[in-house]
Image: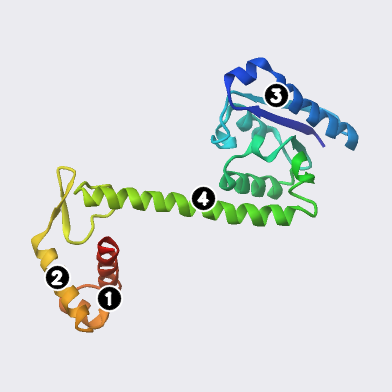
């Protein structure tokens, strides 16, 4: 078994000053000594933001490239390695699958193989999904705003419009079709019945009318 440490500071000034790095390294070596382990190398990430995924950082990438089955990585705190729950979850799952342990001192030990592992993974999974949903919602908000300004935001062109010179321009034929669909729906016609009159799929009609309702709201 080989033991590696990982420490990080987010600014160049902190990296040059070294106080925070030295404190982190002392925690890593102290924990290893209590376990009777010898640290082979401590990977020092200086002046890199935690928002950068571990695999995209110079030392993080190098660390992931050398660890193998039976090895152990020690880091003082969760936020030294990860700022994103999605990045943490994906990396932990990869380390666990290859048999590499990861000690987070602030969480009490190896988060891939002891009693706290299941709890950590459950919490990270929930937070990661929340992060993904927030990103999806921000993208939807941007697209809705662009559409309201008549600007094409990419992706599939919404039914009822054409893209001309980067802007959404109403398609008269499809707009007339939308008006007919709205009127039929207001009368209580089913999506299937409306779809038959418009030559569309029932789910397509539902998506078109749902999108219009959201924009009206």
Q: Quadrant of the N terminus?
A: top right
Ranked by sequence position, the earlier of labels 4 and 2 is 4
Residue 173, horizontal then vertical, whole percent:
9, 64
Mark linked to residue 179: 2
Estimate the x, y position of residue 160 in percent, counting from the top left. 17, 61
Asked if the residue under mark 2 is in contact with the one under mark 4, i.e. CB atoms within 8 Å, the reply is no
Judged from the image, the secondary structure of the residue bearing numbered disc 4 is helix
Q: Earlier in the sequence, mark 2 or mark 1?
A: 2
Of label 3 and label 4, which has the lower sequence position?
Answer: 3
Residue at (14% x, 70% y) in the render: 179
- Across and down, in percent, residue 39 comes to 81, 29
Q: Earlier in the sequence, mark 3 or mark 1?
A: 3
Callout 1 secondary element: helix
Nearest the camera: 211 or 38?
211
Query: Residue 20 — which label?
Result: 3
Of badges 3 and 4, nearer the viewer stands 3
Q: CA distance from mark 2 to mark 1?
A: 16 Å
In the displayed structure, does residue 174 sit left or right of residue 138? left
As measured in the structure, the alpha-carbon distance from the residue carrying label 3 to the one carrying label 4 is 29 Å
- State the CA–CA distance, disc 1 to disc 4: 32 Å
Q: From mark 3 to mark 1, how far is it between C-alphas?
A: 61 Å
Residue at 74%, 28% in the rendered image: 24
Give the labeled residue for mark 1: 202
Cα distance between the residues tagged 2 and 3: 64 Å
Position of 210 compared to 89: left or right?
Answer: left
Q: Nearer the viewer, residue 215 or 163?
A: 215
Q: Is residue 72 above or below residue 124?
A: above
* CA–CA distance in space, label 4 to label 2: 37 Å
Q: Which mark is residue 131?
A: 4
Res 177 label: none
Residue 163 located left or right of residue 61: left
The quadrant in which residue 79 appears is top right
């Amino acid at each position: 078994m080989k033991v590696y440490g990982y420490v990080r500071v987010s600014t160049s000034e902190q990296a040059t000053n070294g106080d925070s790095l030295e404190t982190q390294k002392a925690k890593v070596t102290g924990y290893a000594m209590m376990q009777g382990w010898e640290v082979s190398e401590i990977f020092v990430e200086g002046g890199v933001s935690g928002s950068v995924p571990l695999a995209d950082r110079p030392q993080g990438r190098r660390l992931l490239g050398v660890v193998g089955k039976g090895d152990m990585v020690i880091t003082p705190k969760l936020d030294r390695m990860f700022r994103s729950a999605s990045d943490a979850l994906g990396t932990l799952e990869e380390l666990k699958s290859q048999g590499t342990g990861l000690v987070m001192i602030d969480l009490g030990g190896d988060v891939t193989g002891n009693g706290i592992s299941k709890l950590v993974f459950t919490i990270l999974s929930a937070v990661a999904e929340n992060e993904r949903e927030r990103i999806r919602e921000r993208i939807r908000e941007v697209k809705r705003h662009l559409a309201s300004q008549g600007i094409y935001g990419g992706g599939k062109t919404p039914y009822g419009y054409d893209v001309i010179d980067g802007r959404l321009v109403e398609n008269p034929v499809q707009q007339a079709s939308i008006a007919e669909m709205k009127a039929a729906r207001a009368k209580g016609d089913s999506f299937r019945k409306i779809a038959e009159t418009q030559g569309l799929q029932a789910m397509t009609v539902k998506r078109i009318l749902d999108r219009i309702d959201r924009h009206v709201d």
